[in-house]
Image (cartoon, rainbow, N blue to C red):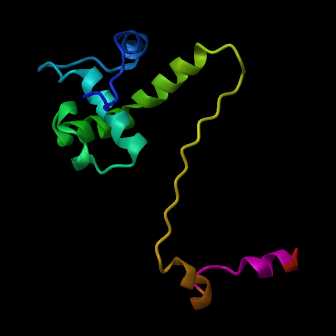
Amino acid sequence: MNDLLLLSKAQMRRIEPCFPLSHGVPRVDDRRVLSGILFVIRNGLRWRDAPAAYGPHKTIYNRFIRWSRLGVFNRIFAELAAGSDTSDQLMIDATHIKAHRTAASLLKKGLYPDVSAAVVAA
C-alpha cells in the first residue's frame, strides 16, 4: 500500500463537512473510497483497474457518480479554495482531449466547418 494514495486524517477532517449525511446503512469508509477516486482520476485508469485496497471498483464508481450529481466535489473545491488567501481567483484545469483516429477526416468529408475559410471571411 506504499505506492497507493491515501488521504491523511487531517485532510479528511477538513473536507468532512462537505460530504452528505448517511441515511440508513452506514457507508463504506469515505477516506478509502475518496482516495480510490483520486487515485483512478490521477492515473487515468478505468474504474475496474482501481487497486483492491480501495475497495470494490463498483463502490468507488457509484460514489463518484452520486457525489458528482450532489455537488460534493464542487463543495470540496470551494472549501479548499476558501482557505487560501493568496488570490481571489483559483483556477483548476484537468482538460484531457482524446481524438478518435478518424477525427482528422471530418474536415475532408465536410462534416466539420472549414476553420481557414472563416478566418479569411473575417
Which x, y percent locates residue 69?
37, 37
Query: Looking at the rendering, which quadrant does residue 120 occupy?
Result: bottom right
Query: What residue sits 86% from the left and 79% below the top?
Result: 121
Q: Is residue 13 above or below residue 67?
A: above
* The magenta stretch spans residue 68: no
On the image, the x and y values in percent for residue 101 come to 47, 77
In the displayed structure, does residue 92 sit left or right of residue 39? Answer: right
User: As drawn, is 72 to the left or to the right of 2?
Assistant: right
Q: Residue at x 29, y 33 (%)?
A: 36
Which residue is at the front of the view, 15 or 48?
48
| 67 relative to 121, above or below | above
Please tell me whether residue 89 is drawn above or below residue 12 in the rendered image: below
Q: Quadrant of the N terminus?
A: top left
Q: Position of residue 107 (x, y in %)?
A: 61, 84
Farthest residue in the front direction? 2
Q: How many marks?
A: 0
Who's the residue at 56% across and 80% down the image?
104
Can you say which quadrant of the picture contains the C terminus? bottom right
Residue farthest bottom in this picture: 109
Report the side of 69 relative to 26 (left or right): right
Tell whether position 113 is magenta.
Answer: yes
Please report the bounds of the magenta region as a residue range. 111-119
Asked if 120 appears above or below 89 in the picture, the reply is: below
Q: Nearer the viewer, residue 108 or 50?
A: 50
Residue 8 percent location from the top left of the image = 36, 15
Q: Is residue 94 left or right of residue 6?
A: right
Quadrant in the picture for residue 33? top left
Q: Residue at x 17, y 37 (%)?
A: 52
Image-quadrant location for residue 64:
top left
